[in-house]
Image (cartoon, grey):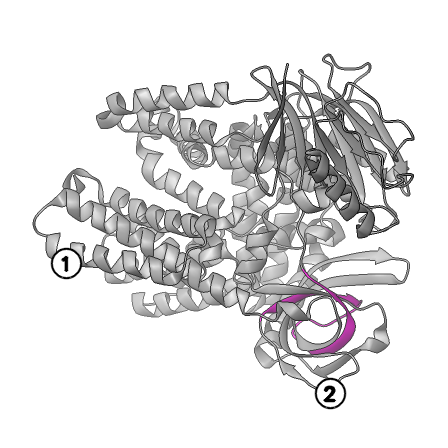
Amino acid sequence: MMGRMKPEWISLSLVLALAGGIALADALSLSFTFWLSLLLPALGGIFFCHSRSHAILAICLILAALALGAGRLQLEADRYEVLPHQAAGARLTVEGTLQERRNTYVNEKGTVGRYVMQVRNYAYAGEDDVQTGSGFAYVTLPEPQVLGSTVAVTGESRPLTYYKNDGMYDALHRDREKAIWLRLFVDDESRVSVTAPPGRWAAFLQDLRQALTGRYEVILGETYAPVLASLLFGGHYEDLPPGLLESFSATGLIHILSVSGSHVALLLAVIQLMGRTLGLRPRGLFCISVTFLFLYGALSDFSSPVVRASLMGSISALSLTARREYLAGHALALAMAGMLLYSPYLFFDLSFRLSCGASAGIILFQRPVSAWFAGLPSFLRDCLTVCVAAQILVVPLLFSAFFSFPVYSLIANVLVAPVLDLVMVLGLLASLLSLLWGGGADGVLWLIKPLLALALKGNAFIASLPGSRFWAGQPSKWACLGWYLAVAFVFCPAVRRRIVPVWLACLAAAWFLRPSGPGVLVLDAGRDQVTAVVYEDKSADLWYNKSRFANPDQAAVVVTPALRAQGVFRLRQCRVDGDGADHTLALLRRDFTFLSGKGGGDVPFCCLASVPPVFPEGLLCLEFRSLTGWNGRDFPVSAMATIVYGSRRGDEALAEWGETAVSYGVPCFSPSRDGQVRLYRWRGQWHISTFDEEQLWSIRNI
């Protein structure tokens, strides 16, 4: 079997098994010893069966890769668990190095920034017992601060918490991948003291970044300089012009603003061109290429796409030096395997998945896709081929993360992407020239300015066209499996007959298991309280109670993705109460289409601001925004379930309500504990599902 497979398919299949082991270990949380006991027999099977049976060898290889990935993730999980989580929640004095600035915002005390700090040591405030720290922490500090400096700060700490709704960014695995275990808030400059300036390497990189961005700004101005910096090195998103991220997302070019393999390929092309022009020998050119790749990775904070692409680029440069065949599939598999073994939580990173999926799609499908456009001119054929091939494997990822597909992606990739590629080539050339000849760098930047303006205006025009996005919501696992089986059906003729029955079964399962009819979605929005009644046409009525202590943009960062994941893109009635209601309503109007009238379908549900003297009858589910007014005795025994929040009386009232609910045999849910709560109808029966337990409560036949 393995002898008939293409080499790149074998390599990518093994690294896919490695990734599958990581996902399996994260779901099962078994001990490292278990996975080791699975790995050793698999290695023995590889040793004894490598020359006997190809089928057994394939099984042993896949089993070994799966066990290796699972064991590696379990080791990393065990290492994360031994971090000093018990210190979170106390007032702490922490000393560490500021590694990354995440974002800045303005509050009542001025401008503050959120940083990632490498923890060196910590102590409970007021105590002299200093303990050695490890890992990283989110630290909110008054601005300005110098990246790379070591500071000692004193403030209130909090454990990490995560919103438990469908459609949210996977912050939990991101923090585990970076070993972040603490949040610290410092609101007084006197509580921040610098104990050491940035190191030489950190200071060099910071000075180099500032010098490059400063040169960009002199020629390009404050509007285009951050765009070029984002195109070349990623980041700078806060400084981008308003609406630019949205327009790039609508055209499917958002990946260009984060460093990826295309950036590294363009950098290598520039270096190779300059090196050959100067007459450098292959070995010297290889050393220079690797040096600049490392420097470029450092300037881009060694993000996962940069590391993966740099590894592939180094292999490519080595193949040019050794004058041997460069197999992109093997290089991609090697880079992916090395990165996953070094940091297994990268598997859950969306950027890593999209980057690897697009690269694998180009490697595997470029030739057959090129045949589809055989009658077109070569330039147009190549652009369309790369664009389509790169999208094939990432379509389910795009829908899962962004709930939509960019309709005009092909047009944007043909018309706008080549101009942006030229801008990046010239930008990299200007960056290299700035180290040698400032005048030449300025001349290239003057050439970039009109090209960048043309690309941005053209992209904005395409994004503004009607129907620029196909909105569909988050697909089910069955739908994703059905898509990949369809890909196998199209591109693997040898297995078409075997795939068809499984493909039809997946499509039937995706259709049969979908919720039908209206329903209710109660979101985990922190201090905010959000309830949506979703109708059969996927429009919704929304009741939003805004807390003054929550993020002012909570509607955009939590509510919008959670509703879009459920396929809700239109609101009929929207009631927003509380502090900052006008701002919240403006965010919702920006992200949703507002309709008139009420949707069709009755929902046996009622949401109440407080506990009334008399409970309503004939309803399956009751939600209480506050337990204020409850006498501690009466209970809605006719309801089949209740959803409650904590009140000013604190957790005691919530616990007492829960105990009463248990005594009456009525399920009780709380978004802060269970995550999002969803009431929906399926096959004529009402169900309640929770995010945490993923329990399905069948509460009444209709």
> Which quadrant would the N terminus be assigned to in this image?
top left
Q: Is residue 156 magenta?
A: yes
User: Seen from this angle, which residue lies furthest bottom?
Assistant: 128
In the structure shown, which secondary structural element does the residue marked by tag 1 occupy?
Answer: helix
269 or 492, nearer to the observer: 492
Answer few, some or many: residues within 10 Å of disc 2's Cα (few below 14, many 20 plus, some between 14 and 19): few
Given the image, on which type of amino acid does mark 1 rest? Answer: Phe
> Which quadrant would the C terminus be assigned to in this image?
top right
In 3D space, how far apart are the residues under numbered discs 2 and 1 (Cα atoms)? 57 Å
Quadrant in the rendering for residue 194: bottom right
Name above or below for residue 479 compared with residue 308: above
Name the spot of residue 92 as percent of width and height, x first: 74, 74
Quadrant in the rendering for residue 97: bottom right
Q: Which of marks 2 and 1 is in front?
A: 2
Q: Does the magenta stretch include residue 653?
A: no
Name the spot of residue 482 as percent of width and height, x first: 41, 26
Horizontal side of 274 relative to 104 (left or right) equals: left
Give the residue drawn at x 78%, y 36%: 530
Answer few, some or many: residues within 10 Å of disc 1's Cα (few below 14, many 20 plus, some between 14 and 19): few
Name the spot of residue 651 as percent of width and height, x first: 79, 51
Q: What residue range appears in magenta?
A: 135-159
Quadrant in the rendering for residue 420: top right
Indicate which disc residue 47 carries. 1
Q: Mark 2 points at which residue?
A: 128
* Pointer 2 or 1: first along the chain: 1
Given the image, on which type of amino acid does mark 2 rest? Answer: Asp
Give the residue drawn at x 87%, y 50%: 649
